[in-house]
Image (spheres, grey):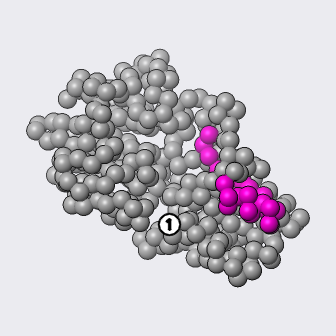
């Protein structure tokens, strides 16, 4: 681990995994969430066309990118559109990963490896998520009840990734989209994702459509203190439903101030992380991003050789 991300080096080949800033070295960018992006106009970048295009729309430049490079294999991580993990020799880096199917997103693939570098965002036992079908059933019941009382509903999830899942799972309600979500949805469709088209909230409001209640809208992960949410509540008496993996834990309450909080994540939950480790059958495990100490400790108690990946500790297996 370096100050600029994880450095892999073997037989003279070096690659930085999800570096935090631009570099002249070869880099791997796993996906297009902004905490994994930077302007990359120096060295070669291994990433997908979807990630490059989404990054561009979000204001980041990734030049000189390739989708294939000898000795490396990108494999689906199931996190968002275009997201990948990386296999390099006998090392597997998961990036952000989700192994469960969610609407049009299929669960990530898990290869065998000797060394596993895995995220553990939800690497504690309290983070075990309900089945997707149960979530859909629960939310449909909430929406039905609110509709019967003429209440409009706004579903909140991350602008990139979760909002598209919500758009598809609840398409039968013919939702409007927040303008920012519409832009991402349109980009998803350009890559062949079969997603219902709709208009953005600015057009819907200016056309008077929001006055015809009830209605459903998909919006980015905004808090109740945001101007948008305050406006929608004061003018339309909208009810808000927030979606987050953090909603599962009472210790980490989903504190956006929404009327309902539903556990739904684009990451593995605790049990899925354990299944991932067992499927990989690694000799050595390094934990990154999340409950690194806690998850490594649990794995050690289960008989695995696991430890958090800290700065400069990477040399141990290079």
Q: Is residue 158 above or below residue 246?
A: below
Segment tinted magenta in the rendering: 226-246
Q: x, y percentage for residue 61?
A: 31, 60
Q: x, y percentage for residue 273?
A: 48, 36
- Name the one closer to the observer, 241 or 42: 42
Residue at 48% x, 33% y: name it: 290
- Name the one closer to the observer, 309 or 199: 199
Residue at 73% x, 58% y: name it: 230
Q: x, y percentage for residue 3?
A: 30, 33
Residue at 17% x, 41% y: name it: 14
Q: Is residue 6 above or below residue 26?
A: above
In the picture provided, is 228 more to the left or to the right than 112? right
Q: Secondary structure at mark 1?
A: helix
Task: Look at the image and say whether residue 43 sits in the magenta stretch.
Answer: no
Judge whether residue 140 can be spotted in this image: no
Q: x, y percentage for residue 291?
A: 50, 29
| Residue topped by disc 1 | 184
Judge the density around disc 1: few (<14), some (14-19), many (≥20) Cα neighbours within 10 Å. Answer: some
Which quadrant of the figure has residue 167? bottom right
Q: How many marks?
A: 1
Where is the C terminus found, in terms of image quarters?
A: top left
In the picture provided, is 296 more to the left or to the right than 235? left
Judge whether residue 225 can be spotted in this image: yes
Q: Is residue 239 above or below residue 195?
A: above
In the picture provided, is 141 more to the left or to the right than 280? right
């Amino acid at each position: 681990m370096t100050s600029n991300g994880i450095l892999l080096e073997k037989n003279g080949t070096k690659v930085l995994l999800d570096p935090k800033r631009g570099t002249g070295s070869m880099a791997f960018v796993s996906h297009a969430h902004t905490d994994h992006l930077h302007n990359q106009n120096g060295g070669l970048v291994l990433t997908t066309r979807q990630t490059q295009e989404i990054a561009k729309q979000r204001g980041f430049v990734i030049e000189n990118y390739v989708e294939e490079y000898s000795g490396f294999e990108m494999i689906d991580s199931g996190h968002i559109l275009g997201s990948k993990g990386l296999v390099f020799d006998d090392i597997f880096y998961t990036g952000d990963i989700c192994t469960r199917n969610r609407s049009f997103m299929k669960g990530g693939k898990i290869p065998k490896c000797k060394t596993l570098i895995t995220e553990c965002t939800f690497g504690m036992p309290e983070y075990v998520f309900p089945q997707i079908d149960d979530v859909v059933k629960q939310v449909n019941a909430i929406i039905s009840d609110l509709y019967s009382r003429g209440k409009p509903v706004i579903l909140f999830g991350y602008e990139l990734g979760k909002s598209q899942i919500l758009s598809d799972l609840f398409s039968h309600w013919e939702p409007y989209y927040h303008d920012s979500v519409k832009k991402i949805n349109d980009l998803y469709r350009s890559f062949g994702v079969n997603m219902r088209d709709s208009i953005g909230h600015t057009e819907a409001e200016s056309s008077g459509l929001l006055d015809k209640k009830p209605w459903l809208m998909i919006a980015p992960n905004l808090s109740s203190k945001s101007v948008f949410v305050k406006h929608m509540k004061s003018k339309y008496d909208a009810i808000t439903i927030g979606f987050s993996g953090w909603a599962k834990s009472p210790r980490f309450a989903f504190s956006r101030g929404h009327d309902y909080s539903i556990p739904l994540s684009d990451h593995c939950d605790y049990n899925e992380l354990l299944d991932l480790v067992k499927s990989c059958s690694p000799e050595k495990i390094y934990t990154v991003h999340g409950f690194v100490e806690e998850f490594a400790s649990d794995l050690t108690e289960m008989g695995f050789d696991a430890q958090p990946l800290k700065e400069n500790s990477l040399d141990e297996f290079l």
